[in-house]
Amino acid sequence: MIVQAINEMQTRQQRLLHAHHHPGARGDGRGWRGASADEIAADSEHLALLAKEALLVAEHGELLSLNHDLMRKLQAEHAEIKRLREEIQEMQTLYGYRTYSYDSSESEGSESDGESDTEEDMLNWLSMVTKANRELQEGNRSLTQRIQEEREAVIQMRVKLQEAQWKGYSHDTPITPIC
């Protein structure tokens, strides 16, 4: 609808400009349809506003599409978080049963060196896993930021492509890259 209005305005503007450059028989500077320079300027301004509106509508559509995709991914991430929490809870419960079973079969204070080594190994392993997790989270934040920047660049490029299509550019006309 907006594109059609822009095309109609461009056609009207071309007719008005032609009429302005080829004045009628009256010789008063008014064209074949009686268009003045002010009317032509007003039409040009209106056309520019319509073009700007079309670009904003296109960008809004792209942002809505991105929002839909991100919301879908967010729901999937929440489901994965819930699943992992349930799995962690189950593992903690099983570990609790195993520890309780082990503790009840041994007398208090009879911990051997082998058991102490196992606990120390587990603490070392926990420390390594925690450190690796922190590093992965930092990398994830960095990648997420880069992905967001790329998404914004893609949106701007799609809007530019739509603008080029509206203006009737051929496919071989170069478009200045955003990034």
Image (cartoon, grey):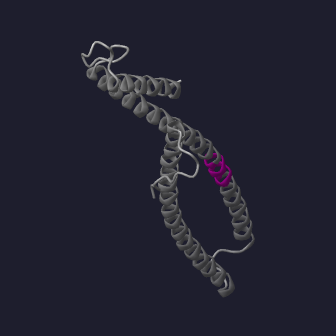
Residue 46 visible in rendering: no
The answer to whether residue 83 is magenta is yes
Q: Report whether 159 appears left or right of 13.
A: right
Res 28 → quadrant: top left
**Position of 47 relative to 92 (above/below):** above
Query: Front-most of 158 and 119?
Result: 158
Q: Which residues are magenta?
A: 77-85
29 up-or-down from 69: above or below? above
Name the image quarter holding the C terminus. Answer: bottom left
Q: Residue at x 47, y 27 (%)?
A: 6
Q: Nearer the viewer, residue 59 or 93?
A: 59
Q: Position of residue 104 (x, y in %)?
A: 72, 67
Q: Tell whether position 168 is magenta.
A: no
Q: Position of residue 81 (x, y in %)?
A: 62, 51
Q: Nearer the viewer, residue 133 or 138?
A: 138
Q: Main secondary structure of the magenta part?
A: helix
Asked if residue 114 lies left or right of residue 27, the reply is right
User: Please, is residue 45 above or below residue 82 in the view?
Assistant: above
x and y percentages locating residue 94 in the rendered image: 73, 60
Numbered disc total: 0
Frontmost residue, 31 versus 64: 31
Q: Is residue 98 above or below residue 48?
A: below
- Furthest residue in direction left, as rendered: 28
Q: Residue at x 69, y 75 (%)?
A: 107
Query: Which residue in the rendered view is the most extreme toward the bottom?
Result: 113
User: Residue 148: x percent and y percent?
Assistant: 49, 53
Residue 77 shows in the view: yes
